[in-house]
Image (cartoon, rainbow, N blue to C red):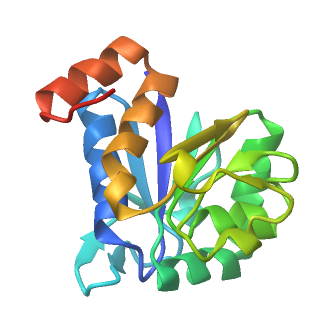
Amino acid sequence: MSKVYALLAEGFEESEAVVPIDLLRRARVEVVTVSITDDPVVVSSHGIPMTADTVLSAISDTADALFLPGGMKGTGNLKASEAVADLIRKHLAEGKYLSAICAAPTVYGLMGLLEGKKATCYPGHEESLLGAEWTGAVQTVAVDGQFITSRGMGTSLEFGLKLIEILVSEEKAQEIANQVLYPRS
């Protein structure tokens, strides 16, 4: 069974976090929600508190993938955390997947990790994808090596299904798409 760490920072965008987490759990992927502070309760961008499964300081291993939800304030808090940067570098070094949606791909971009990679993000933030080939509106989800990026709340379903496709199988992604009545091309 694959395992994903979903990093939650104060100000995360609710749908960008919950929709992919929901889809992954339907596919029987172990998703561990992780507060990046020592408080397990993380408040979203629209004031909804969410209790994480654990806190970042309790994480000592790597998962098959890291997942960073967007939200402007949440993304800023992810960028400001050296512990988050350390966990990202550890996952990168171990060849694990690094995924992010909306503004959150800029965390990887500003760390210099997207150099020469295809990536996407919320329009207007592409300048922070340093050295990346921005796929823009051409792709709702961009996959290049270890990196899986997506554009925003409206692409949360496709993003979650792409994670299932990569971590489990294309067949499981299609099965889950059918279950949730999502017309996948």
Residue at image x 60%, y 74%? 78
Res. 62 in view: no
Question: Which sits in the foreground, 155 or 50?
Answer: 155
**Residue 75: x, y in percent?**
56, 76
Task: Judge left or right: residue 55 versus residue 60.
Answer: left
* Image quarter hosting the N terminus: top left
Q: Would you place residue 152 above or below residue 145 in this image?
A: below
Residue at image x 13%, y 27%? 179
**Residue 20: x, y in percent?**
34, 47
Task: Judge left or right: residue 147 versus residue 25.
Answer: right
**Residue 17: x, y in percent?**
36, 60
Quadrant of the rendered structure where residue 164 is? top left
**Residue 145: x, y in percent?**
73, 33
Residue at image x 83%, y 41%? 93
Q: Would you place residue 39 above or below residue 174 in this image?
A: below
From this viewpoint, which residue is outermost toward the top? 171
* Image quarter hosting the C terminus: top left
Question: Which sits in the foreground, 123 or 166?
Answer: 123
Res. 121 in view: yes
Residue at image x 33%, y 58%? 154
Q: How many numbered markers are drawn?
A: 0
